[in-house]
Amino acid sequence: MTSMKIISSLWRRSGSGKLLKKLSCLVAMGGFLWLMGVGHNAGATNYFNWGAESNSTSIGPVLGYRMGTTQDCSVAHTGSCSMKLRVVGNDNNNQGMGIDLNQNNYPFSVVGNKSLYYRWWMNIQPGFSWGIGGTGHHLTKASRVLGVAEIRVYTGFLEDKQFSISECGLDPSQPGGICDPNVGGDHAAVINYDMTKKNDGIWHEYIVRVKPNSTPISYDAEFQVWVDGRSIGQVNNWHLHSFGSNGMIEAWGGWMVQPYFQLGSTAADGGTIYLDDFSTDDVWNSLIPGSPFGGLPAPGNLQVR
């Protein structure tokens, strides 16, 4: 097993016996978490990843960069490059961004599928504004999942005040998934979170988990979101899709790979966002040390080398 050197400024105190005891306990805990993480990821499948280092993703080439989108090799979370978005505030609720790439046809159907974990790292620059009031939506469509036979499945939304699963059949203009219940505005699952406070110029990790209902008529779908390794909310016992043999297609790569902004605000709104380290997996896929199941973040002042 690879050895771990664990250092904490909190434990550099007098009394070598106490220090050794604490270090021994922490090494044991770290080894346990490492083993559990290995076991948890055994047989895991990655369906998409891209680190913005090149114009090649795990499912094929980047076919192009959309409006206001560039590869930026002066800012990165890992490696040397990220995807830079220059979001316009007065977009008339119509601003397709991100990269173009081929759709990803999964080897399974929507209904009965296991959880998928969508990860990305995002750095929203100071001064970014989602817009205030007016006719704007103050959001971006962050993902779109389609079906092979019944086209519409759902759209994932990242909004100024929430994450949501929407556009899946309740609105007559968006036929397909028949999500239920409708909690307003064709939203089937909503997790409240204030994104307006994330324009701090710091890299943050976001993970979204979506598990469809197990049968065409069951109400056991799940939706969960983590920010920086901490769960910010979970919605259970709802209905995502009604067509049992409908093959699943990831139309936009994953969450925030090909975002469709709808700020509908003023020229003073919008701003710059950097994105990096995208991954879609069927297991917990955080890059934050110490939380292999998303329950606990790494202890304060702890370094694992």
Image (spheres, rainbow, N blue to C red):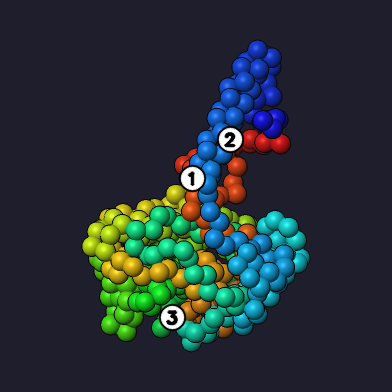
User: What SS does tag 1 mark?
Assistant: loop
Where does residue 139 sit, x and y in percent of width and height? 46, 73
Q: Secondary structure at mark 2?
A: helix
Label 1 sits on residue: 294
Image quarter in which the C terminus is found: top right
Q: Residue 136 bears which disc, if any?
A: 3
Quadrant in the picture for residue 144: bottom left
Which amino acid type is marked by label 1? Gly
User: Nearer the viewer's eye, disc 3 or disc 2?
Assistant: 2
- What residue is shown with label 2? 34
Q: Residue 259, how many percent across, how many down?
A: 53, 73
Amino acid type at image mark 3 = Gly
Name above or below for residue 5 compared with residue 64. Answer: above
In the image, residue 39 sits, relative to residue 157, either above or below, namely: above
Q: Earlier in the sequence, mark 2 or mark 1?
A: 2
Q: Nearer the viewer, mark 3 or mark 1?
A: 1
Report the residue at 55% width, 30% height from top: 32
Task: Name the residue at 61% across, 81% down.
Answer: 66
Estimate the spatial distance between the alpha carbons at disc 2 and disc 1, rounded to whole Å. Answer: 14 Å
Characterize the local packing of mark 1: few (<14), some (14-19) or many (20 or more) Cα atoms within 10 angstroms.
some
Quarter of the image holding residue 135?
A: bottom left
Q: Is residue 18 or residue 216 the one in the foreground?
A: 216
What is the distance, in whole Å, between disc 3 and disc 1 at their CAs?
Answer: 34 Å
Task: Report how many numbered discs are placed on residues in the image.
Answer: 3
Residue at 49 percent of width and 84 percent of height: 94
Q: Is 76 placed left or right of 223 in the picture?
A: right
